[in-house]
Image (cartoon, rainbow, N blue to C red):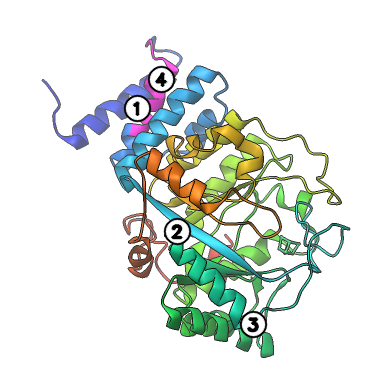
Amino acid sequence: MELKSPQKTCVKKDLFLMLSTMSAVSVDVTNRDRIHALADRVMSGGSVDREEAMWLFHLDSQADITDLMAAANRIREHFKGNKIHLCSIVNAKAGGCSENCKFCSQSAAYTTESPRYGFVDAEPVKEASAEAERNNVTAVGLVAAWKGLREGPILDEVCDRIREMAADGKVRPDASLGLIDSQVVADRLKEAGLACYGHNLESSRRFFPEHCTSHTYEDRLKTIGFLKNAGIKICSGGIIGMGETREDRCDMALELKAIGASVVPVNFLNPIAGTPYENNDPLPPMEILKTISCFRFILPRQEIMVAGGRTVNLRDLQCMIFMAGASALMVGNYLTTLNQPAEQDLQMLKDLGLDPDWEAHEEMESGSCGEGGGCGCSAKLEPAEVSA
Ligand code: SF4
């Protein structure tokens, strides 16, 4: 009998996937069939498990990667339509950071040409908000190069900037201000009007100590716990190209799903002279595009945002990030390196028939993590629960 309902179709496809992985049963299933069956499952509200995700990350041929990208693009269109979320950042305190992240030109541990200055006053933030509004950007993140934020005069200044941005009303005020060691700090940020806080996991739990020893993965998870308890949305992703394995990238994506990240920035290493990674080989662009696609399978409803290292690593292939499943873009310059002009990015979106997503702001405010409420991550978590 013909199976017609979406649920039955999904069951049929899962059975097909199961059969294709059983060596005792001879079923002639191509990689393309398996990729698209997994995509169908994801679009029906299902998910890929770690073994399936690892299989996607290990696809290697050009034909398989283009099939994977086509399937990821279908998932993006299914959940996001033609809307692209745009963000930008303002470097609110530059250089001289006490931490030793090996990819970062702002660490005081390395000698680089990165600028150094203290926490900015209102004017540069106002200018950044105005420029962002002109470029159809939804949110501007205040970013500071320091270990983290504690109670005291700096927190007061940070809250002032956030309040000024909120009152200005041009963009959504976001922030990425490092580690937070108490609930009071997160609550103060929320009270000032902060909607979303950027705090990357950077890599897998296993690889983290390879690129940073001045704080721990657990410190990062604990910070995320305080922010979630305060009702602040989480923007958390990582950086690829540091020497991590595909398994590390897969595990990072799964962890980002587990912590309930709403926005997932994916950065690609831009090796900066003077940092320990200055001689790292760049990742092949197809490996980068494949990684974005795999993230879309694991994080189907989240905003997957292509962030730092885009132009230097992808060059002419930049526009393919959306066909690989990305749904958000960092526009304007990065913290210490240049991006392509925002007008060029806007033209790229127009040429692809994509639109900046103004409603992303409302979605962030709605309290949805993007997982349809089924994963429980919108629930308030104790910091200890997050670091499981
Ligand atoms: S904490 Fe941030 S600013 Fe400091 S070294 Fe690490 S990445 Fe750079």
The tag earlier along the polypeptide, 2 or 1, is 1
Depicted 125 relative to depicted 115: above or below: below
Q: Residues within 10 Å of mark 4 (few under 14, many from 20)?
A: some
- The yes-or-no answer for disc 4 within 8 Å of ligand 1 is no
The C terminus, quarter of image:
bottom right
Q: Position of residue 163 (x, y in %)?
A: 49, 84
Badge 3 amino acid: Asp
Question: Which mark lies nearer to you, 2 or 3?
Answer: 3
Tag of residue 32: 4
Q: Which residue is mark 3?
A: 121
**Label 1: how many residues lie within 10 Å, few (<14), some (14-19) or many (20+)?**
some
Q: Is residue 187 magenta?
A: no
Q: Which mark is residue 262?
A: 2
Q: Residue at x 81, y 60 (%)?
A: 100
- How many dots with numbers? 4
Earlier residue among tags 4 and 2: 4
Q: CA distance from mark 4 to mark 3?
A: 54 Å
Residue 116: image tag: none
The first of marks 3 and 1 along the sequence is: 1
- Residue sitting at 30 percent across and 45 percent down? 81
- Ligand 1: does it lie within 8 Å of the C-beta at label 1? no
Residue type highlighted by circle 4: Arg
Whether tag 4 and tag 3 are in contact, CB under 8 A, the answer is no
Which of pointers 3 and 1 indicates the residue nearer the eye? Answer: 3
Label 3 CA crowd tier, 10 Å (few <14, some 14–19, many 20+): few
Going by the numbered disc 1, the residue's amino acid type is: Ala
Judge whether residue 32 is colored magenta: yes
